[in-house]
Structure formats: structure tokens, C-alpha cells
Amino acid sequence: MRLLVTGGAGFIGANFVRATVEQRPDVRVTVLDSLTYAGSRESLRGVDSQIRLVEGDITDAELVGKLVADADAVVHFAAETHVDNALADPEPFVHSNVLGTFTVLEAVRHASSANPVRLHHISTDEVYGDLELDDPARFTDATPYNPSSPYSSTKAAADMLVRAWGRSYRVAATISNCSNNYGPYQHVEKFIPRQITNVLTGRRPELYGTGANVRDWIHVDDHNSAVWRILRDGTAGRTYLIGADGERDNLSVMRTILRLMGRSADDFDHVTDRVGHDLRYAIDPTPLRDELGWRPEHTDFESGLRDTIDWYRNNESWWRPLKDAVEATYQRRRR
Ligand code: NAD
Ligand code: DAU
């Protein structure tokens, strides 16, 4: 299989590429990534000789057209992904997430007239908006879209384009909406790696608001095994929700990180809450389990978190160059 992976130098994409190279020697991987602040060649170190990495933008129609015409399948991870960045400046989100997905879809549509190209579009549970803390409901593929932030609205727009291109042009596409990922190679702007690296650099961890907000955590390797299952066995036109029953409030995640790192439970600061902060996400992954037989492997969150902390301890050279700039941005925005 000739596989094009957009955004393969980012957090989830790099883990996907690494797992693919290790586990599927029959797959020839090309990565297309513009290496924004969130993408890094370093995340592909060790597998770089076994893949082709093309530095380029997913809105470059000519480049994307050529790469897609040379592929049997495309997994589309590339996006701007951080909610706080989207609140500060939404323009890159519209560019990469909406125009970028449009460009990928057009390339798949045109290439498929000569040779069918299968597309899997990576999306997020944030397109569904949020749930009340005490609501027993979880998101399903029937939940209406109700995005809250500039980030999630651009992801929702991209999902709508994928659905329309499937119906109107018979583009053979699946979509997955996954919950919050954690694991190695995640940018230090995000909650879990930010707090781990705050402790490692002698800064105080920061919790938005009261920390009652709930996220549904899944290990990145489980997200990626689900993506492979959908790519292989999923039905074109379908949307699959990916989650691993990992609901936890931010305060308890913070306290677990502090305990695993030998700090006291109150060794953090409450800071100003995120504007429009979504309260709770929760995924019902039943169809993925029942129809495609997928199961997560990393079901022990504390053990996954311990491994993630160890990874950041042992890979300081990967995150250290990013850390000061990220914290400076957070401090500037707070003023
Ligand atoms: P990330 O920010 O770590 O990586 C994004 C990658 O896309 C980077 O390598 C970046 O350079 C690249 N990119 C951005 N704009 C580009 C453009 N215009 N052209 C080419 N490359 C571009 O993101 P991530 O956390 O790995 O997320 C990957 C995908 O998974 C995104 O589509 C995101 O919406 C989705 N997702 C993420 C999570 C999560 O918890 N992180 C959960 C569900 C879904
Ligand atoms: O649900 C999937 C989404 O998860 C993905 O689509 C996004 O790309 C990804 O960034 C993530 O979005 P969140 O906004 O949930 O993730 P973030 O890591 O930014 O924050 C997680 C929670 O922690 C959220 O409730 C805000 C809070 N938080 C975050 C930071 C950075 C803090 O309390 N303190 C912090 O310093």
C-alpha cells in the first residue's frame, strides 16, 4: 500500500507513522507536513530513512495533487490543533483546517477518476460541543454538531466537506472523531505535557478555572490502532467515534501528575479560565467495538501517564527548545 500521511510530523501523526513503519512493512509511507511550530523532523527520527518526508502545505493544490495521485490511501491528520491558539488568532485554523481539507478532498476526487484513492479524515469529539458534568449522555455519531471554539468550528466545517464530497463525488472517505490523546511527542503547549514539563523546569503547573472540566483521555497508540482498523475495515461514508472510556476531570489529572512526580497535591496554581471553556467531552465507542472489533490496549491511565512522564524525563532534547517560547506566549496572553 502507498500511504500518504498529512501532518505526519505532528504528535498523533508521528506516532502513527512510527507504528506503521514498525508494524506494517508492506506499507510505503509518504509524509506531507509544512513543519509548523507543532511539527518536527525530530519526531520522526529513527524511522526517517524508511519514509519519504515532503515539506509542504496541504493548501498547495499542485503538490497535494501529485502526492495523492501517487497514493492508494490518504490519512489526513494535518491541522492547527490548539484551542488557546485559535482563540488568539483563528486565521491559520481556517486556512489549514478548512481550505487544507478542501484541497485534499479535491486531490482525492481527481486522482480517483484514474485509480481509486481511499481517504481517512481525522477529526475530533469537539465538533459535538460539550456535555453537562452531570449528564449521563455520551457523544455518538447521531449527536448534532455544535462546536464552541474557532478550532472546533473549523474541524466541523472540514467534516462537513468530507461528508459532502463523499455523497456528491463518491470520494471513498471515512471520518473519525476522537477524544483527548496523550503520550509521547505531544507538544508542550497541551495540558498533560505542559504540566509535566512545568514540574521538570521548576515552574508551577497551571490549572484553568476550578479544574472541574472533564476530558475523555485515550493513549495515542490506541487512537492510531483504531485509525488503522477503520482504514482497513471501515465503510466509506461512515463516521466512527474513537474513545477508551477515559473520562477524568482536569483537577484529578493534575493531582495524578503531581503524585507520580513526587510533588504535593496542591503544588499548582489556579489561573484564569479559558474563554468559552467546554465543560465535558465523553465518547460512546460502541459501534467501533461491536462492528469493527477494536479494543484499546492502554486501559490503565495511571500506567500510561507514568510512561508519558518517563518519556518527557528521558527526551528533554525533544521538548526543551520549545518550552520557554510556549510559556512566554501563555504569560503574554494572560496580561
Ligand atoms: P499537532 O498540532 O501536534 O500536529 C499537527 C501537524 O500538522 C503538525 O506536524 C503541523 O506541522 C501539521 N500542519 C498544520 N498545518 C499544516 C498545513 N497547512 N500543511 C501541512 N501540514 C500542516 O496535532 P495533533 O494533536 O497530532 O492532531 C492531529 C490531528 O488529530 C488533527 O487533525 C486534530 O484535529 C486531530 N485530533 C487531535 C486530538 C488530540 O487530542 N491531540 C484528538 C482528536 C483529534
Ligand atoms: O478532545 C479532542 C481535542 O483535545 C483535540 O481535538 C485538540 O486538538 C486537543 O488540543 C485537545 O483539546 P483540549 O482543549 O481539550 O486540550 P488541552 O490540552 O488544550 O486542554 C485539556 C484541558 O486542560 C482543557 O479542559 C483545558 C485544560 N488546561 C489546559 C492547559 C494547556 C488547563 O487546565 N491548563 C493548561 O495549562
Image (tube, helix red, strand yellow):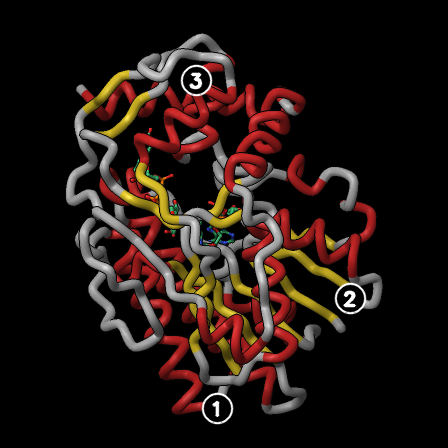
* Viewer-side residue, 291 vs 4: 291
Mark 2: amino acid? Val
Residue lying at 58% horizontally and 63% vertically, measured from the top left? 295
Q: Earlier in the sequence, mark 1 or mark 2?
A: 2
Looking at the image, residue 310 lies above or below residue 91: above
Ligand 2 resides in the quarter of the picture at: top left
Residue position marked by numbered label 2 in the rendering: 27
Of residue 182 and residue 159, the one placed in the foreground of this image is 182
Gap in angstroms between the C-alphas marked 3 and 1: 48 Å
Marks 1 and 2, Cα distance to the nearest angstrom? Answer: 25 Å
Question: Residue 85 location in percent, x, y?
Answer: 31, 39
Identify the amino acid type marked 1: Arg
Secondary element at image label 1: loop
Horizontal and vertical percent for residue 126? 31, 57
**Closer to the camera: disc 3 or disc 1?**
3
Residue visible at 55% across and 19% down?
320
Residue at position x 73%, y 61% from top?
29
Q: Amino acid at mark 3?
A: Asn
Comes first in the chain, label 3 or label 2? 2
- For residue 248, which quarter of the picture? top left
- Image quarter in which the N terminus is found: bottom right
Secondary-structure class at tag 3: helix
What residue would you read off at disc 3? 198
Disc on res. 170 = 1
Depth order, front residue of 77/263 = 263
* Of residues 177 and 113, the one drawn nearer to the viewer in this rendering: 177
Residue 298: percent from left, percent from top: 59, 48
